[in-house]
């Protein structure tokens, strides 16, 4: 496996479990988590990220995510996430790696599909 695919496997595990230890394994102590590139108030620090991950999801997510490109410092992950009965998102994630393989910066780029016209 690669650094980015290992990280993505851990992300999926933490997403399902919501266990603080699983989340802490993904992010550095001072990590920054942005929900969009221009997020004016990113979640900063591992304790805040763990707390944010405890929030309720609108539904059990169904997803298909994969590593698009990577090097030792950056992984780009793409795919989709569907919250049945709520919303479906197309995603591109930036995962900026610390030397130990955890993310010190995470940025979501997401889009919702266009609404069908009647």
Image (tube, rainbow, N blue to C red):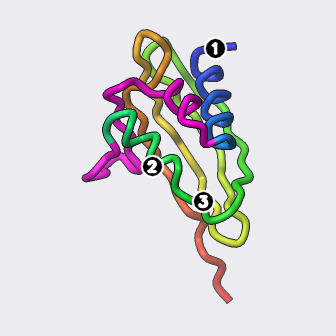
Picture quarter containing residue 82? bottom right
Badge number at residue 57: 3
Residue 69 rendering spot, x and y as whole percentages? 57, 24
Nearest to the eye among marks 3 and 1: give it.
3
Residue 42 rendering spot, x and y as whole percentages? 31, 46
Out of 22 and 67, give the one closest to the viewer. 22
What is the spatial separation of the Cα atoms under label 3 and label 1, in whole angstroms?
29 Å
Residue highlighted by disc 2: 52
Q: Earlier in the sequence, mark 3 or mark 1?
A: 1
Q: Is residue 10 magenta?
A: no
Badge number at residue 2: 1
* Residue 60 position (above or below residue 63): below
Residue 4 rendering spot, x and y as whole percentages? 58, 22
Numbered range of the magenta stretch: 18-43
Q: Quadrant of the N terminus?
A: top right
* Residue 18 position (above or below residue 115): above
């Amino acid at each position: 496996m690669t650094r980015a695919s290992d990280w993505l496997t851990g992300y999926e595990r933490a997403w399902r479990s919501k266990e603080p230890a699983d989340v802490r394994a993904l992010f550095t102590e001072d990590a920054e988590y942005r929900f969009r590139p221009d997020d004016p108030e990113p979640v900063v620090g591992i304790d805040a990220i763990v707390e944010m991950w405890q929030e309720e999801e609108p539904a059990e997510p169904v997803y298909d995510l994969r590593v698009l490109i990577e090097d030792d410092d950056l992984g780009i992950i793409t795919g989709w996430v569907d919250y049945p009965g709520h919303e479906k998102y197309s995603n591109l994630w930036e995962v900026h790696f610390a030397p130990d393989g955890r993310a010190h910066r995470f940025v979501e780029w997401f889009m919702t599909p266009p609404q069908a016209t009647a």
